Image (tube, helix red, strand yellow):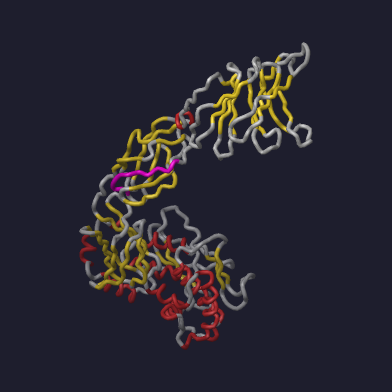
């Protein structure tokens, strides 16, 4: 007795029935084949719509058939409605008839039929089944399609639902050629055994077989799979520890009457699949080392039967001992190996409160992750296992701004530089530095070592009073060697032709302004401004605003 309003008398009644349920239910089915109580009946309208006023709190089955074919009975399980509730959408179809068979098994096994039916109906929702006389039908047999973008989570049930529709339609079309006393359920049971009909139902075979064969391309399974889908269960489950964390590598076996029926090993997500399990009392046992958990259930012939096993132990908490490297840029993107213990599959990593990316648990003692962007300064690194246990290091990683990431290195000069340029002056593939030193009337060349360091400066002097303020690097004489061009405070610009080895010839000066129109160039650029193929010099001057 499962009804809430009967629980006051349920314990003694259930105790009296213990061990006798199978015999009692069989006796009830023989004595009351249509159930107990007065049936509530109605006639559907021209659109197939019906309304039944069933009492609240009482579940049951709706049965219907065409007015001239009482052997073509379709069924659907209807849950108990609440007082004042109006149940809608209780369509009765060949597919719901197949699901009713599963629901009946569930009820006999003492399982709650409502979530089982809901899950099964949802799994076949992507199917669109067209009868031959539908405007888009083929005129010969039932066909099936999937909704655009949809996938099937339960191909076995989808195949049975479509096959049942094909059988029902064939019986409807072939009523004159098949015995009237053979019911739809009888034909269904017959075909589900071996994907073939008894001789009396042979006229149904061409349309049904053609339909099932066409449906195989859509559903993924065909006639050879129907018997297994209709008569066995697939147990889909997972194994976790007491904290709910998935456990990989656990051996799972299904036994019936002390005989192993199927076995599997859990994957990285703790999941397992036990296929082709016959209906009946089944014990599923999970074993990991000395730990073991089991559950016994009444398996019903349903293509997907979910269950979860929990091995009764609490996983040790993770520890975090090292993070390397210990610093990286605020922009993120630093590959970060983490070392510790008891890391679990599915663990997450945060740095400074933000989720790391590309988290990979390579073992129970090592994780790799990529840092997100963060603010400059120390940040806590936290590893959280799926069971909620975590480990952290408060200042294990430091976000560095650009200045702190690349600290400045000083290289001494003889003067005070007012401008700098970089170029490969000696053709060794390494960048060199050139400075214009206004206070000491020279330029300095620091040949690069290619690692961010430079050799001592080479100084190239100017005629007194020049005082270079800005420097540019170009090949102004087209000899393949870089030359230096400077803008000088002394009313001129200078060109130092390069030797190709980092040294330069004496400067040649070009006066800017004449007579009293003296100017002081402060910046310059070098480009071909008149498209004659020759480089020109442009200066920005103070004094005459030129």
Residue shown at 56% from the left, 30% from the top: 433
Q: Viewed as shown, does residue 29 lie left or right of 455?
A: left
Residue sitting at x 63%, y 26% = 471
Reply above or below: 125 against 222: above
Could you tell me which quadrant the N terminus lies in?
Answer: bottom left
Would you say residue 273 is visible in this rendering?
Answer: yes
The segment highlighted magenta reads: 334-343
Query: For residue 341: magenta?
Result: yes
Whether 82 is drawn above or below 273: the answer is above
- 516 on left or right of 144: right
Q: Main secondary structure of the magenta part?
A: strand
Closer to the camera, 2 or 212? 212
In the foreground, 247 or 211: 247
Q: How many numbered badges does the structure rendering display? A: 0
Q: State the quadrant of the C terminus.
A: top right
Residue 389, horizontal then vertical, whole percent: 30, 44
The answer to if 114 sits in the magenta stretch is no
Indicate the quadrant where residue 194 lies: bottom left
Q: Residue furthest bottom?
A: 199
Write down the quadrant of residue 225 in the picture.
Answer: bottom left
Q: Is residue 48 above or below residue 245?
A: below
Which residue is pictured at 69% across the width and 19% down the height? 521
Can you give x and y, in whole percent of width and height, for residue 168 in the image?
A: 51, 76
Q: Residue at x 29, y 64 (%)?
A: 252
Q: Is residue 335 left or right of residue 477?
A: left
């Amino acid at each position: 007795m499962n009804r809430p309003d009967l629980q006051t008398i349920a314990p003694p009644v259930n105790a009296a029935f213990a061990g006798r349920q199978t015999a009692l239910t069989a006796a009830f089915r023989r004595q009351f084949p249509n159930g107990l109580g007065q049936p509530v009946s109605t006639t559907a309208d021209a659109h197939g719509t019906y309304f039944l006023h069933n009492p609240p709190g009482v579940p049951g089955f709706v049965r219907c058939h065409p007015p001239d074919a009482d052997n073509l009975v379709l069924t659907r399980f209807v849950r108990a409605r609440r007082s004042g509730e109006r149940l809608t959408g209780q369509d009765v179809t060949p597919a719901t008839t197949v699901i009713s068979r599963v629901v009946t098994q569930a009820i006999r096994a003492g399982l709650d039929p409502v979530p089982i039916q809901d899950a099964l109906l949802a799994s076949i929702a992507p199917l669109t089944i067209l009868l031959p006389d539908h405007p888009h039908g083929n005129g010969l047999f039932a066909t099936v399609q999937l909704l655009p973008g949809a996938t099937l989570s339960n191909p076995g049930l989808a195949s049975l639902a479509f096959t049942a529709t094909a059988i029902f339609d064939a019986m409807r079309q072939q009523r004159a050629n098949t015995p009237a006393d053979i019911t739809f359920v009888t034909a269904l049971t017959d075909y589900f055994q071996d994907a073939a009909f008894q001789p009396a139902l042979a006229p149904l075979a061409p349309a049904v077989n053609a339909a099932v064969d066409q449906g195989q391309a859509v559903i993924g399974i065909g006639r050879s799979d129907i018997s297994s889908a209709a008569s066995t269960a697939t147990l889909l489950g997972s194994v976790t520890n007491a904290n709910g964390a998935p456990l990989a590598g656990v051996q799972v076996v299904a036994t019936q009457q002390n005989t192993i029926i199927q076995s599997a090993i859990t994957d990285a997500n703790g999941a397992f699949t036990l296929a082709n399990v016959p209906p009946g009392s089944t014990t599923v046992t999970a074993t990991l080392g000395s730990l073991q958990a089991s559950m016994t259930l009444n398996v019903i012939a349903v293509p997907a039967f979910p269950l979860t096993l929990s091995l009764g132990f609490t996983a040790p908490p993770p520890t975090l001992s090292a993070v390397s490297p210990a610093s990286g840029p605020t922009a993120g993107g630093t590959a970060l190996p983490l070392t510790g213990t008891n890391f679990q599959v599915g663990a997450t990593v945060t740095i400074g409160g933000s989720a790391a990316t590309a988290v990979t648990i390579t073992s129970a003692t090592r994780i790799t992750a990529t840092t997100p962007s963060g603010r400059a300064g120390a940040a806590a690194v936290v590893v959280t296992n799926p069971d909620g246990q975590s480990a952290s290091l408060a200042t294990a990683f430091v976000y560095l701004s650009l200045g702190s990431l690349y600290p400045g290195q000083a290289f001494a000069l003889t003067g005070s530089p007012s401008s700098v340029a970089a170029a490969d002056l000696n053709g060794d593939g390494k960048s060199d530095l050139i400075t214009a030193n206004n206070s000491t009337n020279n330029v300095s060349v620091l040949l690069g070592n290619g690692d961010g360091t430079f050799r001592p400066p080479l100084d190239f002097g100017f005629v007194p009073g020049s005082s270079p303020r800005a420097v540019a690097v170009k090949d102004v004489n087209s000899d393949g060697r870089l030359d230096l061009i400077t803008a000088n405070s002394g009313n001129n610009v200078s060109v130092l032709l390069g030797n190709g080895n980092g040294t330069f010839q004496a400067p040649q000066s070009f006066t800017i302004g004449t007579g009293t129109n003296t100017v002081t160039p402060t910046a310059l650029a070098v480009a071909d401004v008149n498209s004659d193929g020759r480089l020109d010099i442009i200066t920005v001057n103070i004094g005459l605003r030129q």
